[in-house]
Amino acid sequence: MCPGGRGRWDVDVVGVTIVIAGGGLSGLSLAAHLTRQPPAEPVLLVDDGSRPVTGAGWAWWSERPGLLDGAACRSFDHVRVHAGGRERVLGLGRYRYRYARGADLAAAVGRLTRAVPDFAARRGHVEAITSDAGRARVLVDGTPIAATWVFDSVLGPGERPREDARLVFRGWHVRTERPAFDPEVPTLFDFRTAQDGAASFVYVLPFGERHALVEHTAFAPPGTTADVPAQRAALAEYLTGVLRAGAYHVVGEEGAALPLSAAPVRRRHGAVLTIGTEAGLVKASTGYAYERIQQDSAAIARSLAVHGHPFALPRPRPRHRLFDGALLDVVTRHAGQLEKAFAALFDRTSAEPVLRFLDERTSVAEEAALFASMPAPAYVAAVARRMRA
């Protein structure tokens, strides 16, 4: 079990020059990373409490230690994949797969910020963010706050990129009467679920032999909305028909439909920088965002410390967006192709090469070796369509 955690900021601040709009994952992560290289200006985080992180949780893989790793309550060095009629348990090499509850993450960030002067947070609704003549202004509950820099995870850019697909998921926190889960190995993908209309798999994050998060996930065409009864039926069938878990009790439920896009987002608007999911940091081919947000937050803090502005950020290589877009194009046209692709990619003893590729850390030669095992025609056609567009 992951322990509970509490974290709360409630401080008024005068003379603010850096504002973080939104106290979700990206806002909290940026606040944490700013404490490692504290800016000279006071920092204020503003959040209206409408989407508390205490009920959320995040999983991620990483090959290097992270600032907030201590918030994780589960850490794994192997993962399970069931695709193409085969089950594989793969080591992670230098990687680790972790999970943190939102309450624990907020508490960890609170400990970091309380140790640094001039960090504060206040409850308030961000109504508007503007930038003019090198300065920004945030309207909070009718009160304007002037700032040198604003990091926006709430309103986002005015023009959003085209949606390529939608990640539709529903998860159950379940407890079973008898042991049903391997507590040491999460299941990243299990394709033993119906593929009707969308490429679908089940994900299992174990907390013990009788307790796990079991999640049904689908890569669906743009604009798809969740069919909640069908999702629940698929989860029930997986628990009883695939895992043969016997009697179980659903103690919590979560779900969402996330737009996915392989297109870049224009993040900078004068003195305002968009962060988090609004900045396109959800990896389009996986739906994961946590580690990308950590890396981005660290880069922003480093840019402020070295250059005096937050815009010296690494640029993603265009070919990785092309790969992501091609995958989404294929699986939204041909649902069965996702299982074939993942069966080929994970047909090895270690998941490390695949995770490095998904982290966009591979060379062209390494990518060619990975692609050699994949079903080529559909992806070649998708790449060609993307390049023409």
Image: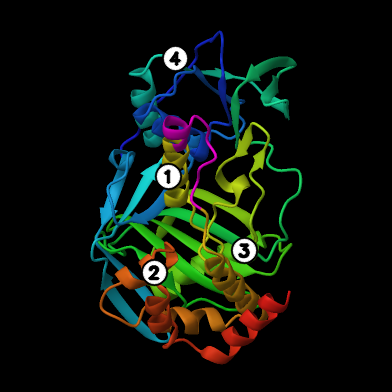
Residue beneath label 1, please?
A: 294
Q: Disc 2 marks which amino acid?
A: Thr
Answer whether residue 240 is visible to the viewer in this image.
yes
Residue 262: give its label: 3
Does the CB distance between marks 4 and 2 fall below 8 Å? Answer: no
Neighbours of disc 4 within 10 Å: few (<14), some (14-19), many (20+)? some
For marks 1 and 4, give the CA distance.
22 Å
Q: Disc 3 marks which amino acid?
A: Ala
373 shown above or below 247:
below
Q: Based on the picture, tell me whether residue 359 belongs to the magenta stretch.
A: no
Q: Secondary structure at mark 3?
A: loop
> Residue 16 versus residue 179: which sits nearer the camera?
16
Q: Earlier in the sequence, mark 2 or mark 1?
A: 1
Which quarter of the rendering shows the C terminus? bottom right
For marks 3 and 4, give the CA distance.
37 Å
Residue beneath label 2, please?
A: 362
Q: Which residues are magenta?
A: 303-314
For marks 3 and 1, give the CA distance.
20 Å
Q: Residue at x 48, y 61 (%)?
A: 215
Of marks 4 and 2, the one in the foreground: 2
- The percent coordinates of residue 107 (x first, y second) are 37, 29
Of marks 2 and 1, the one in the foreground: 2
Q: Secondary structure at mark 1?
A: helix
173 shown above or below 107:
below
Neighbours of disc 1 within 10 Å: few (<14), some (14-19), many (20+)? many
Taking the view exactly as shown, the residue that stands out farthest to the front is 307
Q: Secondary structure at mark 2?
A: loop
Residue 383 found in image quarter: bottom right
